[in-house]
Amino acid sequence: MPKNGQNYATRLNGVIQLVVFSSTVYFFSLMQADPDLWGHIKFGEDLWAAGKLVRFDPYSFTAYNHPWNNHEWLAELFFYFAYFWQGDAGLLFGKLFVGLCIAVCLSKICHIRQYHPLVYAVGMILAIFVISPGFMIRPQIFSFLFFTFFLYILHIYYKLKKNYLFLLPFIMVMWVNLHGGFLMGWALLILAVSSETIIGWVSQRKNPQNKLLWMWTGVTSLAVCINPYGYKLLVFLFQSLTVNRDITEWRPIVWDDLSFLRFKIMACLFIITLCMNIKKSSGWEVCAILMILFASLRHQRHTPFFAIICAPYLIHHLSETFQSFQKIVKLPHLTKSVFNCLTIFIGLLAIYQFYSTVSLYAQTKCRIIVSPKEYPVSAVRFLNLNNIQGNIILPFTWGEYAIWKLYPDCRVSIDGRFRTVYDESVIQAHFIHPDDISRLQELINQYPADIFLARQSSFWNTFIKENKNWIYVYSDKVAVIFLHKKILKQFSSGLQYPKSEPLPYFP
């Protein structure tokens, strides 16, 4: 380190903190609409208007008046208020605020332990990079936030002997009404206290900290039942989670390709670091990371939880390894010029990330992007333009978009609420390939409808020939629409078609 090393180190730490938070802003500024965003805002709006929880489904015809286990009702209220008060910007900046809170909390956990500034920067940016694909405007971001809070409270309890465990039940009461991911926090608590207790028994070492943690774990477990459904919510979630979901984010991670490369790098670093530092590792922390790693390998959607819990562990132990390597190899101290160049480079990187993010927001005027290549934007405009009403069969990921645009004139056959509303038979009937004409035929026979909105496919000529009751009326590069012939009779004077391209913005 050059002369006045303390001043240079302070300056370097400052720009490193800056680049960590600029990376948070940069990677967490995804502006694409989640398929369920329309539904979350709509459900929050209707809940607020009704002044009570909507317990029976009014939006579909395949599960009309069926009990609805809406365990995300509080998140939907937040989304509705954010959108009502500030529009798209309220949702985007609200999501960014949650992301920054996660980054601040993770940084505080890292500061509790020994770390090297450069290792801290690389580890935090890698963690943010792993989290970012799942960081959409959806209730799950609250689970990422509260999971980080739980992790922070455990760290300061075990590392600093500070007791903030009394906050856990209050956090859980919020969490259980925001998103089903509260199960991750609950499992983290139980695993932490159980593993430390077992390790104490095996090593014949008493740990008085565990008694207090056991007590607050029990209170937090009782807080799980403070929701509109009580203990029945747990029964529903456990039943639902034991059944496979044919949804991309619920599929396992495949290791023999380059998918999820950032997660795989982080997982490999953890395994290597664990093998090198097994005696120095905290028992509860390793057990928790291994649990989340297993969950992530089984279901892709859990990878952000792994990044959150693994980042502090990696940063601490890789810093120790790096410093040990420095002592063995006896690397020369950085000169003043090298120190300045490194500081300038990191500072410029932070400035570039902030500038790119601000430019993106300015270019879109803080609007959420709705890609006409992913959603049936023009097809739904066609239905609205002609005031076509009735029951509509459509793909799973388009359901809540259609609810926003077409309800109450149309009721959908399925949407992203999945098992919280729909029976398994309805779900399985819809999870079919668009080219599977025979199963499509079974679907429309099993659930008679007036409108059939489907993804574009080269097989629709065969469908038209085999289905005389369904008349082709519209198609574009994304979607195709068939109307039942009894509905088409209402439009003897002809149908109108959209003349302009839709703007790619929410809603």
Image (cartoon, helix red, strand yellow):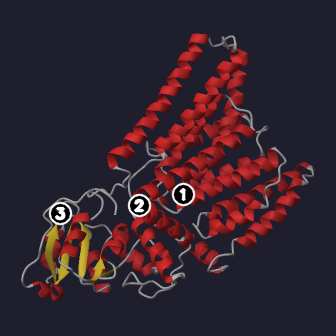
Q: Farthest residue toward the left? A: 493
> What residue is at 47 percent from the left and 86 percent from the top?
66
Circle 3 sits in a helix, a strand or a loop, which is it? loop
Query: CA gap, disc 1 to disc 3?
Result: 34 Å
Q: Residue 87 carries which label?
A: 2
Q: Where is residue 112 in the image (x, y as percent from the top left)?
A: 75, 40
Residue placed most toward the observer, 201 or 474: 474
Residue 129 horizontal/vertical position (percent): 51, 42
Identify which residue, 352 or 259, lies in the foreground: 352
Q: Which amino acid does label 1 sit on?
A: Ile
Q: Can residue 33 be seen in this view?
A: yes
The residue depicted at 80 percent of the width and 50 percent of the height is 157
Rendering quarter of residue 500: bottom left
Kindly report the distance in space between the C-alpha atoms of the residues bearing marks 1 and 2.
Answer: 19 Å
**Residue toward you, 72 or 367:** 367
The secondary structure type at the circle numbered 1 is helix
Label 3 crowd bin: few (<14), some (14–19), many (20+), radius 10 Å: few
What residue appears at the point 72 percent right and 16 percent down from the top-left corner? 328
Q: Residue at coordinates 53% horizontally, 48% vertically from top-left?
A: 131
Residue 41's quadrant in the figure?
A: bottom left
Task: Find out whether the residues at labels 2 and 3 contact each other: C-beta distance under 8 Å.
Answer: no
The quadrant of the picture occupied by the N terminus is top right
* Residue 354, position as x, y percentages in the image: 46, 37
Task: Name the disc covering residue 489, or none.
Answer: none
Near mark 1 (Cα within 10 A), the count class, few <14, some 14-19 or many ≥20, is: many
27 with respect to 215 (left or right): left
The residue identified by callout 1 is 141
Gap in angstroms between the C-alphas marked 2 and 3: 29 Å
Q: How crowded is mark 2: few (under 14 residues within 10 Å), some or many (20 or more)?
A: some
Q: Residue 476 carries which label?
A: 3
